[in-house]
Image: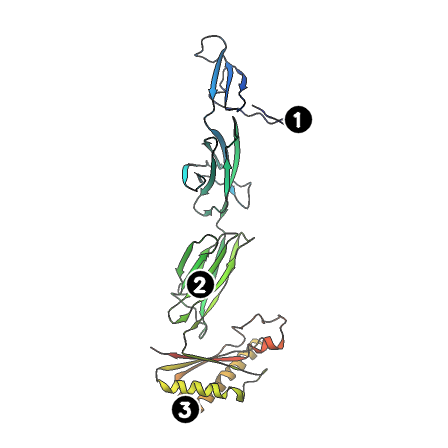
Amino acid sequence: MSRRHEGAYTIPENLGYPLNTSSDDFSLVLDNGARRGLFASNRPGGVGYDDIYNFAVKSFFITGKTVERNETIKPIGNVKVIVNDVEGTPIDSTYSDDAGFFHVDLDFDKSYQFSASKKGFSWIDTITYSTRTRALGMDSIVLPLWKNAMFAKGIIYSNETQDKLSEAVVTLRNVTDGTVDSMATSQTGTYNFLVKPNKKYVVEATKEGFIAREFELNTAGITQGDLLNDMVLEEVFLEKIIVQFDFEKWDIKPQHYAALDEVARVMKRNKKYHLHIGAYADSHGTHEFNLDLSNKRAREVVLHLESRGIDRGRITATGFGEELLLNQCSNGVICSEEEHAKNRRAELKVQLTK
């Protein structure tokens, strides 16, 4: 059968058995709906040399192929193809062959949704098909599957020690679809989730004794690769203050004395309180210089608190250099003096020991 389209005929389709046989089948005539008709044939079993047969088309024939989404010329074999109704309820299924080909018969005057599944691949598209107004014949369809090739990865760190945190619970919320996945970090503090293109996610990390953190992840326009996002969790604290320093200086400004004295008073209330001091530098200068500078700042804060009667054994002080910047002002990034100044700091946190 060939259809006339814009003054030319389409490529002929073999209608297959039982319309087309090895006998002489000819003179196909269709009614106006093209779902019923007549044809002549000399096939065995007739009452004359050429007989007239009538027929009714019961379904519409679909041939399809399952392929890789990013390389549509690359077929995927042995894929489960699911035919769903308009509500998304599966009503039929089949499997593609080794070359990715499959076929299904659809009822007339209905709408369908196609999906497909195979281990190592994900179905991320929405493909609908309607047989309304369809007639005798067939059609083709391509089902692209996305090869699992994009992952959200990272490491969860402690803000106080920069240690990698194991047993932190990381949750991946798919804002687009409403699905949720979670995992606990390993001894190396790592998490790893499969994420899909054109979705919005929220990644949250929690651990007992730490303040939860989260960030948004958008995969619009991205189809593969590792999306690396480390997270730094801050330990729960009873009291926290920040002491700011001048450029390349480590002496404490008098304006911070009152806040430091308050920290000393809090520490004296309970012998189980422990003080964590983390000191930092901006990105000016070498890594070695900034590490030494931050250690001097941490030591200066410790000396001040010791002068207020706090035992050195109740204080943990660490200089982190230019690590853990509060903003984007890393090496090579142009920032204002005010932005750099935010990173010249010491963070003091009073915590309850177990």
Q: Which mark is residue 7?
A: 1
Residue assigned mark 2: 204
Q: Secondary structure at mark 1?
A: loop
Q: Position of residue 149 (x, y in %)?
A: 50, 52
**In the rendered image of this protein, does residue 26 appear above or below residue 309?**
above
Q: Identify the image quadrant of the C terminus.
A: bottom left
Q: Contact, CB < 8 Å: mark 2 with mark 1? A: no
**In the rendered image of this protein, does residue 349 appear above or below residue 268?**
above
Q: Earlier in the sequence, mark 2 or mark 1?
A: 1
Q: Contact, CB < 8 Å: mark 1 with mark 3? A: no
Give whichever of 270, 229 is nearer the camera: 270
Q: Which mark is residue 309?
A: 3
Q: Position of residue 326 (x, y in %)?
A: 53, 73
Classify 10 Å Cα crowding around label 2: few (below 14), some (14-19), many (20 and above): some
- Residue 212: quadrant of the picture: bottom left
Q: Position of residue 193 (x, y in %)?
A: 45, 57
Q: Amino acid at mark 1?
A: Gly
